[in-house]
Amino acid sequence: MTRWLEKLQAQIVGTQVWRSIFRHGYPDTDVNRALAVFSNVILHLHPIRVKRGALKIRYTWCLGGLTFFMFILLTITGVFLMFYYVPDTRRAYNDIKDLQYVVYFGNLMRDMHRWAAHAMVFLVWLHMTRVFLTGSYKPPREFNWAVGVILLVLTLILSWTGYLLPWDQLALWAITVGAKMAEATPVVGVAGPFGIQLGMRPDNDIRFMLLGGTVVGQSALLRFYVLHCVGLPLIAAFFMAVHFWRIRKDGFSGPL
Amino acid sequence: MKAIPAGSDPAQHLKDQDLSRRKFFALVGWGGFLASMGGAAFGTFRFMFPEVLYEPPTIFKIGKPADYGMGVTDTLKKERQIWVVRNEKGLYVLVAICRHLGCTPNWFQDQARFRCPCHGSIYDIYGNVRGGPAPRTLWRAAVSLDPIDGQVVVNFIQRQDPDPQSTVEGLTVPEEGREVEPFFVKA
């Protein structure tokens, strides 16, 4: 049995397919261990060598990593929810109810998406608090702090756009209220300072652009759906890539 | 369990094939981990199979037999994907799905032919193939009369599909054998 397994293993590892994917031997020497991290597109964001002290959790609490984990979880569960959810005002609420009560694993998917969303917002705040308290926002890391602030805003907008999708009373009025705030933006909002003087009307200001109409209706639902599922995640992924790359470039202090 | 004499090494009483504590925890740990991963994978797979379908019903009523005149009635094609055909003896229902690759043929009253726009299959009023690439004759759906209101009930899923014979005119099924219950209503 064991010999048979060893033969099979040798055969698989010897193929061109295997050797073109894994361009190094088993990570049982220092060189191969370094290559395993270095030559992997996902792992290469990580330092090749991690010092023993860096494994201490109490310095950063791994809050940024946990936030990223939530983002991955949200992306995966979100894709599954998209198989059943249709952003149509006539059926969006029913699709959510189907996910909760009819679709196998649907309620788990929805709950995971919802709780991970709450957790992501919460963890972003904790992460930024930690960065503030350890002074990690100071030069030369001020650029990454600014990128982080953009990611905070993107997280909040992602959360807000997802809020509308169940199309229940809470969703409708939350977005009505939020859009009302957008209306009060200076210059580009009809209710904001200098808005009316600059020709802003309810059908041409920033709220109108946001909702695709003058009320929270079908256009707003579709718009928020597209932003929530495609637009904002892509932008967030781009800024996350910059954020992680910057961490590597700026280096760590303390035990890391 | 036997009592271990005082002063002796407890490990002595273990046999080689006995499960050590380390092995036991490894087994439980990996078993639990793999079981939960397997459960999640299974549930996620099941997720992709809907429990409720929002599709048109496959068993439906199409009104009284008297509503249908001689020959082919073309009015239900869009809504129900069927043609109702009446002859001297009664009614049968043809499924408006081409047997070549599943397009919807059109009925041409002047030619008395169904012609498929996709690849040019031609059928006559019985559903027999008169030309084109279709490998079999048109399906006939099961029909019955509702005992209460006398309406024609169509079962779109239950279909008659006999093996056709190759003749000079095309792939043909003798009509006598086809006009039987539950694929024919005498009316």
Image (cartoon, coloured by chain):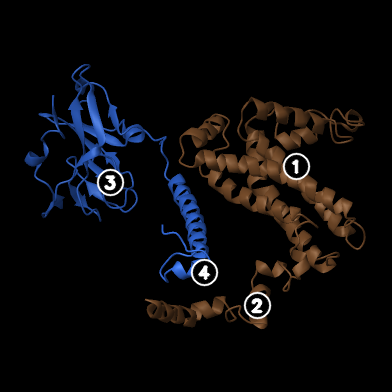
Chain colours: A brown, B blue
Residue type at tag 4: Asp
Residue B59: quarter of image: top left
The x and y percentages for residue A255 are 82, 65
Q: Residues at marks 4 and 3, common chain?
A: yes
The CA span between labels 2 and 4 is 41 Å
The chain to which mark 2 is attached is A
Q: Which residue is mark 4?
A: B9
Q: Which residue is mark 3?
A: B115
**Front one among A42 and A58:** A58
Q: Residues within 10 Å of mark 1 (few under 14, many from 20)?
A: some
Q: Give the label, 2 or 4, closer to the camera.
A: 4
**Quarter occupied by residue B179:** top left
Q: CA distance from mark 1 to mark 4?
A: 63 Å
Q: Which mark is residue A33?
A: 2
Query: What is the three-letter code of the residue carrying label 3?
Result: Arg
Q: Quadrant of the C terminus of chain A?
A: bottom right
Q: Amino acid at mark 1?
A: Leu
Q: CA distance from mark 2 to mark 3?
A: 67 Å
Q: Same chain for the residues at labels 1 and 3, yes or no? A: no
Q: At label 2, which amino acid type do we have?
A: Arg
C-beta proximity under 8 Å, tags 1 and 2: no
In this rendering, the label closer to the viewer, 1 or 2: 2
